[in-house]
Amino acid sequence: MWSLHHLHFMLYVALSCVTCTADVIQVFGYEGRDVSVSCPYGGGYEKHEKYLCRNECGSRDVLITTSQTNETKYSIYDDRRSRIFTTTISTSRFTDAGKYWCGVTRDLKDVYTEVRLKITPGM
């Protein structure tokens, strides 16, 4: 049985990202421009660390975490009030296209949302 809180969260997720299909966030960007990946998360995780990773999302695949905030190519911001963390990929390239994961740390198993990034030629 679906709780009202769960239904509210699902509606929030659907409206918060560029395009969502079956728990996959679709993001589109232009080569040479910055691309932002917005990742909604549920209540109760506001103080947990968030991150963006690629591939299988092992420790070597993590690109940036909220404890890092800025790397050369990636930056991240956690809006705890809206419960959305946003990672910006600077000066995107075709090689940046592919599968990513939004992650939220938890004690036993992290929470993941799949992200598909498509890059098209710049103007």
Image (cartoon, rainbow, N blue to C red):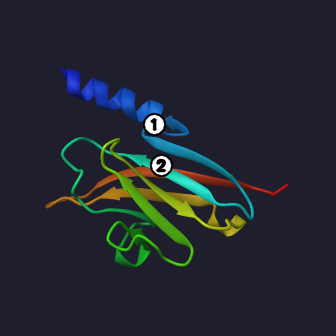
Closer to the camera, 75 or 3? 75
Quick one: label 2, few (<14), some, or many (20+) residues within 10 Å? Answer: many
Q: Position of residue 58 (x, y in %)?
A: 36, 72
Q: Position of residue 41 (x, y in %)?
A: 32, 45
Q: Quadrant of residue 93?
A: bottom right
- Give the residue type at disc 2: Ser
101 in relation to 1, above or below: below
Residue drawn 21% across the image and 21% down it: 4
Closer to the camera, 87 or 106? 87
29 in relation to 24, above or below: below
Instruction: State how many labels appear.
Output: 2
Q: In the image, is 86 to the left or to the right of 116?
A: left
Residue pointed to by mark 2: 38
Residue drawn 21% across the image and 27% down it: 5
Q: Earlier in the sequence, mark 1 or mark 2?
A: 1
Q: In the image, is 49 to the left or to the right of 55?
A: left
- Give the residue type at disc 1: Ser
Q: Is any part of residue 2 visible from this angle?
A: no
Q: Is any part of residue 85 visible from this angle?
A: yes
Residue drawn 43% across the image and 57% down it: 101
Q: Quadrant of residue 78?
A: bottom left
Quadrant where the C terminus sits is bottom right
User: Helix, strand, or loop for circle 2?
Assistant: strand
Residue pointed to by mark 1: 16
11 in relation to 61, above or below: above
Quick one: label 1, few (<14), some, or many (20+) residues within 10 Å? Answer: some
